[in-house]
Image (cartoon, rainbow, N blue to C red):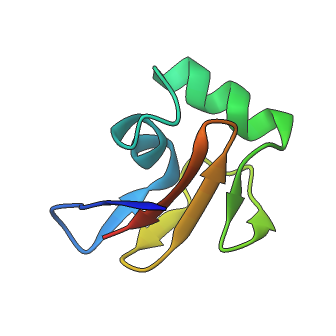
């Protein structure tokens, strides 16, 4: 599993999906979230605005990434 480092203390899930390469664009991130294919820390998540913190794990169709 790879780690993607963020500059601040938190990042929104939609932004992180793009940063980590789990989505190509904002609309792609939205489609991933509404499809039910995204999990945060093992639980399904559909909110683009969900705040992520270092140590959180995000899984999508393209893989699994830890927030660093």
Image coords of residue 39 (percent x, y):
72, 59
59 up-or-down from 48: above or below: below
**Left or right relative to 68: residue 7:** left
Depth order, front residue of 12/16: 16
Measuring 58% from the left and 59% from the top, which residue is drawn there? 58
Measuring 46% from the left and 21% from the top, which residue is drawn there? 24
Image coords of residue 16 (percent x, y):
41, 48
Depth order, front residue of 14/58: 58
38 up-or-down from 53: above or below: above
Quadrant of the rendered image containing residue 68: bottom left
Task: Give the total of numbered labels.
Answer: 0
Quadrant of the rendered image containing residue 2: bottom left
Image coords of residue 12 (percent x, y):
44, 55
Image coords of residue 67 (percent x, y):
39, 67
The residue most toward the front is 1
**Left or right relative to 30: residue 26:** left
67 up-or-down from 63: above or below: below
Depth order, front residue of 58/63: 63
């Amino acid at each position: 599993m790879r780690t993607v480092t963020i500059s601040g203390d938190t990042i929104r899930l939609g932004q992180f999906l793009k940063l980590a390469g789990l989505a190509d664009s904002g609309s792609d991130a939205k489609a991933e979230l509404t499809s039910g294919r995204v999990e945060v820390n093992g639980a399904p998540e559909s909110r683009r605005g969900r705040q992520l913190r270092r140590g959180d794990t995000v899984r999508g169709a393209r893989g699994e990434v830890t927030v660093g």
